[in-house]
Image (spheres, grey):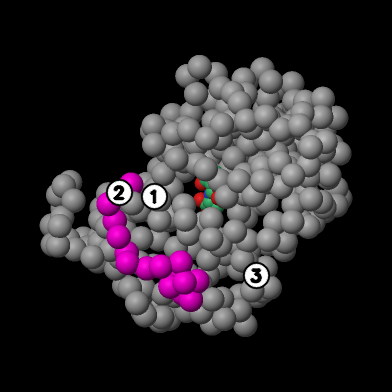
Amino acid sequence: TTVYLNGSFMPASEAKISPMDRGFLFGDGIYEVIPSYGGRFVGFGPHIDRMHSGLAQLSIDPKLSLSDWQQIADTLIADNRAELGDNLGVYFQVSRGTDTKRGHAFPSNISPTVFGYAFAIGPEPVADKSKATTYAVVTGQDLRWQRCHIKSTSLLGNVLHYQQSYAQGAQEILLFDKDGNLTEGAAVNVFVVKDGVIATPPLSNKLLPGITRHILLAILAEHSDISVEQRDVSEAEVLAADEIWLTSSSKEIAPVLFVNDKPVGSGQVGDVWLAVQQLFSQHKF
Ligand code: PDD
């Protein structure tokens, strides 16, 4: 596997980062995951915009432009496609950099550590009920911090929530804030459908502004016959929903069939999901 580290491409085995890197010591960095199918990226620009926004909020400047990132990503795909296949995710991570000692304050004289690698992902999801990858989820209180809009590499809160679902035999967790409103999952945004109306929580510091969420909402906005609401969604609404979907770059729009071992709606992949996945598959680029 060829990876990118600080300006160079090299075999993964040769890529070395100091234990004094603030990414390692503090999780002081930002990451991004961008899917590609057959060399075609989904939402490349919005993904890089979100990464730049996160880095700016942390006062980290890797001095790379959109076209620099595009070149790195294209090279990672080209160099790894023969080994890893045609469907690849690109992972980027920028940390504040490597210091000589551990100290909480931002050092002024270090440069960011920039890492990129490609990994195999599943085939592009298709609008076919029988081919959908479906999920069983549990519910829980959101115990993460109040800056969930930042795609920070400090993912312990998300990892613990994911593990909470995994330990119960599920593959994601729907999280609720202290007022009982849905935020997101450990690594996904969440949509619910009731009587044909689609709802998802509004953007805030409580959830990541998902690119898949963004693309899906933009597509649905062009269809006046489909009702979409960005508003608070209560736990009762989630438990009574006809359909629940998880969205993320690797899952696209994935139907949830069980919440806390109880079937969602009919317990089958829903008709609204099918209609929406059809639109998404046609329009996402
Ligand atoms: N996860 N919410 C959280 C907490 C996430 O970590 C992610 C993405 C999403 C969905 O965002 P997007 O549609 O931009 O992928 C929502 C990535 C894929 C990960 O950590 O692997």
Q: Looking at mark 2, is its residue's CB closer than 8 Å to ligand 1?
A: no
Q: Secondary structure at mark 2?
A: loop
Q: Amino acid at mark 1?
A: Gly
Report the residue at 28% width, 63% height from top. 112
- Circle 3 is placed at which residue position? 40
- The amino acid beneath tag 2 is Leu
Q: Residues within 10 Å of mark 3 (few under 14, many from 20)?
A: some
Q: Which residue is mark 2?
A: 58
Q: Nearer the viewer, residue 23 or 6?
A: 6
Q: Are marks 2 and 1 in contact (CB under 8 Å)?
A: yes
Residue name at image x 37 percent, y 68 percent = 64
Residue 283 in percent (x, y) is at 74, 56
Q: Quadrant of the C terminus?
A: bottom right
Cβ at disc 1 under 8 Å from ligand 1: no
Q: Distance from label 2 to label 3 (Cα)?
A: 30 Å
Q: Determine if the magenta segment contains residue 71.
A: yes
Give the labeled residue for mark 1.
54
User: Reading the chain from its start, which is encountered first: label 1 or label 3?
Assistant: 3
- Amino acid residing under circle 3: Arg
Q: Is residue 196 left or right of residue 142?
A: right
| 200 and 266: which is toward the camera | 200
How many neighbours does mark 2 have within 10 angstroms: few (below 14), some (14-19), or many (20 or more)? some
- Position of residue 249 relative to residue 205, above or below, is below
> Which callout, 2 or 3, points at the residue further toward the start of the chain?
3
> Can residue 261 be seen here?
yes
The magenta segment is 57-72
